[in-house]
Image: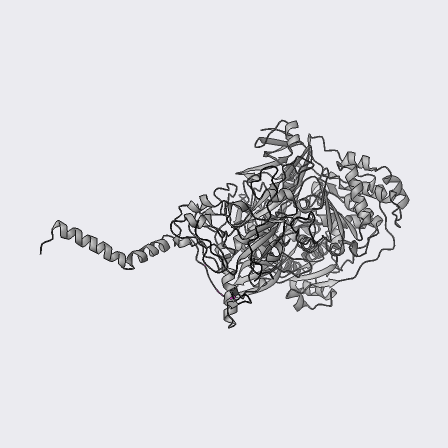
Amino acid sequence: MSAKKEFNVKWGMAIDLDKCTGCGACMVACQAENNLAPQADASNKLRVMNWLVVFELSNNKAFPDHETAYLPRPCQQCAEQPCATVCPVVATERNEEGGIVSQIYPRCIGCRYCMAACPYHARYFNWFDPIWPKGMEKSLTPDVSTRPRGVVEKCSFCHHRFMKAKDKIRAKGGEVYVRGVDNKMHCAVPEDGYVTSCAEACPNGAIVFGDLNNPDHTVSKLVRGNADAFRLLERLGTDTAVYYISKREWVRRLGDNYVPDEETQKPRQILPKKH
Amino acid sequence: MGLDRRTFIKFAAGAGAGVMLTPIPWKLLDDSAIWTQNWPWIPSLEDGENTYVYAFSKSDPSIVPIQVRKVNGRPVRILPVPGHPLGGGVSALSAAEAQMLHSPARLRRPLLRGQDGKLQEISWPQASNVLLDEIRKAGAKTAFISGDENSSVIEVISALAGALGSGDVYLMPSDAQDAAVAASLAGIGARIGYDLESSDHVLALGANILENWGTVMRNRRIFKNARPHSFRKAGEKQGAGAASLFLAYAGPLQTNTAAVADLWLPLYPGTESVLALGIAHLLLAAGKTCAADDFDAFREFVAGFTPEKTAGITGVDAAKLKQEVEKLLAAKSPLVIVGSEFGSGAGAVPVLAGLAVNALLGNVNKPGGLSLLPKSAPAFTEAASREDIHKKSLIRFLAAQEKPALLLIHDANPVYALPDPRKIREAIQAVPFKVAFNSFMDETAALCDLILPADMGLERMDDVETPYGSGKASYCISAPATKAQAGVLNAGNTLLQTARRLDKALGFNTYEDVLKSKAAQYGKVGFDDLAAGVPALSEEKATVSSFSFKADILKQAPAAEAGGGALRLAPYVRMSLGTAVTGIPPYNNKTLRADELDGTLMSVMLNRATAVKHKVAAGDKVVLEAGGKKITAKVRIFEGVMNDTAGVCLGFGHSEFDEFSKNKGHNVMELMSALPEPGTGLDLWCRTGVDIKKA
């Protein structure tokens, strides 16, 4: 893997699986925000373009002891990206303050190495030209370019919203990056100044977004030292920016490949103590 | 100097190296990357000024307050209104509403069925004349069906019917209808509301409160605020931040609500009323009482509903039921919500039983309890109240031998949404002239002789008056977020204009005038503020001097027999799949999981024990049969289904709309048949037995 880049600001999510009901509002909001084209037959999941998918989880017990939960899965925005390592044309990288893994469509040659490398199956290949029913192109947002057939796509943490938030500060004559008490440069975008579309839409407040490195941000408070928080496939060392929260042990256990008697892993204490 | 082989190679190599030192190859590579991704059929983005308008998603039956983001006047995104008393987030259906404006299934020109039986485009003046002629011909034999129970269009319809001398105005069956009939039977001259905001213990019987019952976005916001995120320090067993709301859900399936509830009580389909009576039995045994007119008769009748007997009928474990009742008794503000599992077909008896339980809990008009909300007066003196319209069964009207001469169907799709669609189709086909006032080409519109394209919620000014499930009376205006598309008109305005042309003017020139008149009833907030998104709320509660448990009707609550089939049918709703009037919105079919729809084959959910018992396995193609009606499905093993129960998703099987809705599974309503509910005037279709066999 490439050398890990650390940033003063690390945008991340905490998704509370005890609050998610799997309603799909986040999935639809994501498609509308990021100009994903609709597909008449969306049942073949190998051909469907979705940046965010809600999976159904089961405790695998028989009725009446069965429990279910839902897990929304955006791109995990790994600090150690398996995808960027294998990309032959540097179409995906993580080199901007904030730690968001980019996807540069004009560079992508559609080889799909990154899809094979991604352990979270968060990357999707555009098998079809993005065609909207006649007139529906009027409902496209001006924020996210439409992508052609033949390129790989993925969740960008609504990066365009981050850019807009920074523009807003600049327009008021402010500085986007300011020096903090730790003498490091930090982003001046406030906690509610940049929120992803899925987090904004979620009617249950299951998705919390913010700077994982900022102890004042809710997301940071939620995951720092919380034994109910976990990341998917933590032991792969991908150091993802998406945390999940559940007080249910069986849900946490599904986050990684545990042997039967093994305790679920506590979140790695990788976050700096002080901002 | 001659050009020998050596010189040529040197020149070529030099040229190659030289070119590589220039930006030319990189520029060409860059250009080719850009231009091979820049095809004319891929739409370009159009930037412009961003504006925001407060409105409501009227496509979602739970009525979602939304902010519409517009770019150059084009609605592009639906965003939540976090502080709104009826809202909080957006639903999967409302989130797609900007795109639905351009759905391929949208009706854009009036259509008239010609002599050859085919629909032909006509102009609006022609369509208005046809409508006028048909109403003149039919006169008092004109009937109306509407699917919009929350806006004042129903009052316009009712006033027009009154002016024509017709009493045939019907609303599509819903939880609101069941509650309105139950309130009327109990002698409560008020609307039933639920103060979820202040409750610390909610027991939802059948009502899928986080998906499709009541004010869903408000319910979800309350749930969100009452449940802090779990935080547990390493080594501790229990996390900090206790929930201020205990949520219990009783239903046959582990639905979205059950997935996050503190307690799931598996309950056989359609047995909510029996479970409520079982709860009442335990409350009476705990010394609870109340001042109902027929309290003694009720107590005597409920004495038979011991936990064991209740368990036998409902499938709810007696010990778990007792525990839950103990929790209800210990709660400060307990609330029991009874509703249908899939939005209709449960009848009024479950709500009546729920009223009794809440009355015994002593929570009526108390914080966190059941609220009695004042009714509002119709804007038209001739119009029947919504409650009176709810009292009439649409199913019985359609089943009657005598048919109206003209049927005007507004914002409703009875051919798809009612049980036994074939019978409904035949009944509607038997009407000499049918008019649909719809936004989309649905199964009912396709049967009609005249189709009038209606504007969508985002294109019109409309109102929302105390949606069912609210804890307070409220009045809101939904401002138009965009101009109506060419060729579509507002149903309210068109009906008012029709009345004028019939020389039966209803007292208002435009639908906006009707809304202004309604708004005046809620005087505190001016019309302009209402139109700007400020809700008018009323803290007023209706008082009731006496009421009845209606023990005589509750006694007739039929036992929960599964209609003769081997399995009990448990339909469920996913709001992301739209409604009968929207079809599946183009952006929403991706929300289906692979195990819910395989190509055109929908799934039927069985638990493993049930599958083994009926000799089917995961992935098997099976036929579900009820009363000679059949649908095919693929078996999905899901342990969140009760024994001998089949979970099936509603919303599939459209034969109209567009490619996003058509050819996907079957309409589960095909398996259901309506039965009269004794004593209430309503009908039931929540108890269906089905047989299953391999296809």
Task: Please identify the residue farthest to the left as the structure is shown.
Answer: B1
Find residue B106 and report its horizontal and vertical position in percent: 54, 51
Q: Is residue B217 visible?
A: yes
Q: Find the magenta span and give its range.
A: B45-49
- Identify which residue is drawn at 73% across, 65% down: B522
- Identify which residue is drawn at 84% across, 51% down: B362
Check the picture and name the quadrant holding the C terminus of chain B.
top right
- Identify which residue is drawn at 58% across, 55% down: A199
User: Is B46 one of the magenta-colored residues?
Assistant: yes
* In-image side of B121 versus A108 (left or right): right
Q: B486 or B74: which is nearer to us?
A: B74
User: Is B245 one of the magenta-colored residues?
Assistant: no
Find residue B25 and report its horizontal and vertical position in percent: 29, 56
Residue A64, quarter of the rendered image: top right
* In-image side of B547 versus B39 (left or right): right
* In-image side of B556 versus B102 (left or right): right
Find residue A267 and report its horizontal and vertical position in percent: 58, 50
For the stretch drawn in magenta, the main secondary structure is: loop
- Specify how the rendered protein is coloured: one colour
Q: B548 or B675: which is nearer to us?
A: B548
- Identify which residue is drawn at 61% across, 36% down: B604
Find residue B403 and report its horizontal and vertical position in percent: 69, 43
Q: Is residue A178 above or below residue A150?
A: below
Q: Is residue B108 visible?
A: no
Q: In this view, does A213 lie above or below B597?
A: below
